Image (cartoon, rainbow, N blue to C red):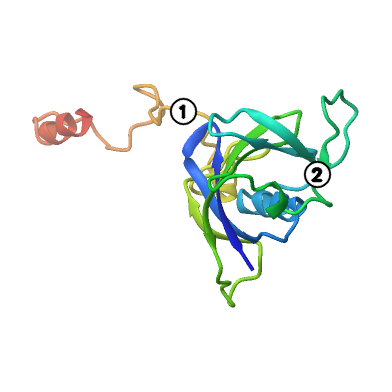
Amino acid sequence: MAILRFRIYFEEDETVYRDVVIRHSQLFIDLHHQILKSFEFDAKHEATFFRSNDSWQKGREISLQKYDKPYKAEPLLMAETTIGSEIKMPNQKFLYTYDFTRNWPFMVELINVSAEENPKLTYPATIRVEGIGPSQYGTKSILGDRFVDVEEKYDLSEGIDGFGEEGDGESDTGDADTDGEGEGEAAAGEEF
């Protein structure tokens, strides 16, 4: 049984991608769910694939369902279409769009075909993750959701530059230094 390895690029940043392996006999709905899982998206929105050529032009549509929009040709349905049936060339490409309101664009490219299955994997599977993927509903950082907790706890939205106004609050150095001792330390501490 052929195992297909696809590289799924986030269209807006090609350094962000996921490699997914899937059996050629599995359905596009399986690939759809694996892409969402690999980019940590939920499955609440509409989606569609387009078979593509080397120039990333849209071809035949393979849709999650038939949407209320005009079609040049009836779309194939993800739940009925095997991936192998739509592979027309060795480096077959697909365009994948998730959530038509937010319009998350991905480029899907076949990068390898293997005859051997890995018995340790449950297909489809994500086998490589590169870059921090986009956040479906807001900002995402290296810290992920934990950053929101830190930001709220320490109110990081104020003093965005990290510096207060000169003379803010009380000084904790005690009495004024009248004999010149410590001036070098204060001057060195003010340089950036």
Residue 138 appears in the rendering: no
Query: What SS does tag 1 mark?
Result: loop
Image spot of residue 176 (x, y percent): 22, 30
Q: Quadrant of the C terminus?
A: top left
Residue sitting at the far right = 68
In the rendered image, is residue 175 in sight? yes
Most foreground residue, 102 or 170: 102
Disc nearest the viewer among 2 and 1: 2
- Residue pictured at 46% horizontal, 28% vertical: 160
Q: Which labelled disc corresponds to residue 160? A: 1
Q: Name the residue under label 2.
A: 44
Residue 181's quadrant in the figure? top left
Residue 37, position as x, y percentages in the image: 66, 54
Callout 2 secondary element: loop
At horizontal 9% and vertical 31% (from top left) the residue drawn is 179
Query: On the rendered structure, is 18 left or right of 26?
Result: left
- Measuring 68% from the left and 54% from the top, which residue is drawn there? 84
Which amino acid type is marked by label 1?
Answer: Ile
The amino acid at mark 2 is: Lys
The one nearer the camera, 53 or 8, is 53
Does residue 11 sit above or below 147 in this rendering?
A: above
